[in-house]
Image (cartoon, rainbow, N blue to C red):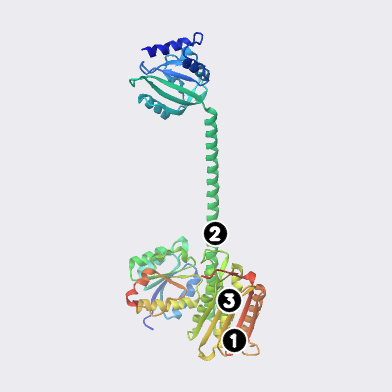
Amino acid sequence: MTEPLRVLLVEDEALILMQLEMLLEDAGHSVVGTAMTASAGSALLRETRPELVFVDLRLAEGSSGLDVARTASDLGGIACVFITANPRQLGDDLAGAAAVIAKPFSGGVLEDTLAFLEQALRRPPPSLAVPHGMVLAPAFLANWAPAEG
Amino acid sequence: MEREDAWRQTDRLQTETGKGDPFAAAVRGTRMPMIITDPRQPDNPIVYVNDAFLGLTGYGRDEVMGQNCRFLQGADTDRAAVQQIREAVEANRDISIDVLNYRKDGTPFWNALYISPVSNEAGEVLYFFASQVDVTDRIDAHLKTWSEKEHFEREVAKRTRELSEALAAKTMLLHEVDHRVKNNLQMVASLLALQTRTITDPAARETMEGMLKRVEALGTVHRRLYQSNDLERFDVTEFVRDLAGDLVRGLGRGDIRLHFDVEAVEVPVAKAPPIALILNELITNALRHAFPDGRPGRLSIAVTPGEASFAIQVRDDGVGMTDPAPASGRRSFGKRLMETLARQLNASITWRAADPGTVVHISLPHDAAVHSEPR
């Protein structure tokens, strides 16, 4: 595979955070940081400038993943993917994120998602089909529409 | 001038014997309270008043003759109504209006007042003729009805608001619990996945991976649970696609083609977890054992609604059943698991050779399924 993706994880459940780290490392990617609150997540976004950030919607200390997504969108060049047990809470535009994965997710779904996002970010347009357990934002999908057409 | 004199004569008449103008006698004798005012005199005073008016208001004739009618007004008289009367009189229009008036003793009454101008042939207004009817009973009944209606509407609005709030609270609680269940299932899967990674013994690792798949199958049930707005029904059809697809990917068996022949079947939510676990065992078994050594193949899953029961069929075109039943602990646990869950569902499971491969048929009783309209 090409250069590993630089990924930031923002999730307040330690066990889920560990599993995500494990799955990312197994897939050969590089976890540049982990955070459990929105403010820590936003600070790490500015500091590490990852290519990809996985964000839980509900974060520690009552903070919201929406704020992390906003920071990512303000900084630019960072694909934000929500991982949440509440995907319906997001509107159709996924609050500016590229995609959403519904909890509980299986290891398989996350592996497929990583393979798809790696293509999408490194060699767009992606040739893989959009993974089963992932919903892609219309705006993100539109990026490749001319190439697909 | 004659006419004016005639009225004055009429006034005099009522103090006399009652003979004379029959119209004047009628006005004098009617039970309808009536007065006449003269707009050509300063402040439009009363120039005639009948006995019925005196009876209604409690005043004596001397007290009202020569007065403007405003002495009937009081504290709670509607100023807007008074203004309407004034405007009508100034414009020489007639007017019909309900207005709150007061008797001499201060008691209020609702007066259905009717005023009309009386003109001569030249169109000049000579008098205003006014009749009064005490409609206190009617107005009170109306106000009471209106107030009761207001009261009931307020009560209904209050109850509706309370019920809406209760429903909103219940819905929020359901979402909160649903959120917790999903997160906790994810944490259980995380624990199993993290532990599995540290295990080097292949058999132990396979056992752990099997457990992880079972937990993930339950996770898939919960992920799908409230995706529709129906909180009590679970769509087996979509779940089968979701689960089978996930298992094929999870085992890295892209060389096995999945084929679905499914009709819409919904089951009560409580039946979803055991059905999910049985399906997980059947599909996992087929994927693990029917296609060894990278043998490609096809896995077909059919869901068929029937009269007394609905059927799920899992068919592979792999190497066929290995007989007798394998001695491996994991597989015997898997078989026991299926039998136990089948008992819970009152379902029957049969295996048979299909040449090539194996067909597993599950029949679930009618009460476990509701055949939904095809979508």
Q: Identify the chain of the residue marked 1, using the numbered disc in the image.
A: B
Residue shown at the point (63%, 70%) measured from the top left: B368
For the residues labelled 3 and 2, the Cα–Cα distance comes to 36 Å
Which residue: 63% across, 86% down?
B352
Location of residue B44 (image quadrant): top left
Give the quarter of the image for residue B195. bottom right
- In this view of the protein, which residue sits in the foreground, B105 or A73? B105
Residue wearing tag 3: B304
Residue B294's place in the image compared with A51, above or below, is below
Badge 2, how many Cα within 10 Å: few under 14, some, many 20+? few
Residue contact between numbered discs 3 and 2, judged by CB atoms under 8 Å: no
- Is A35 in front, or is A75? A75
How far apart in space, not on screen, are marks 3 and 1 (Cα)? Answer: 18 Å
Please report, as a chain letter, where disc 2 is located.
B
Front-most of A52 and A122? A122
Look at 57% across and 87% down and name the residue there.
B289
Between disc 2 and disc 1, the foreground one is: 1
Going by the numbered disc 2, the residue's amino acid type is: Leu
Which quarter of the figure is the N terminus of chain B placed in?
top left
Image quadrant in which you'd find residue B11 = top left
In the rendered structure, the answer to whether residue B258 lies left or right of residue A118 reads: right
Disc tally is 3
Q: Position of residue A124 (x, y in %)?
A: 34, 78
Q: Earlier in the sequence, mark 3 or mark 2?
A: 2
**Mark 1, residue position:** B358
Query: What crowding class fits label 3: few (fewer than 14 Cα within 10 Å), some (14-19), or many (20 or more)?
Result: some
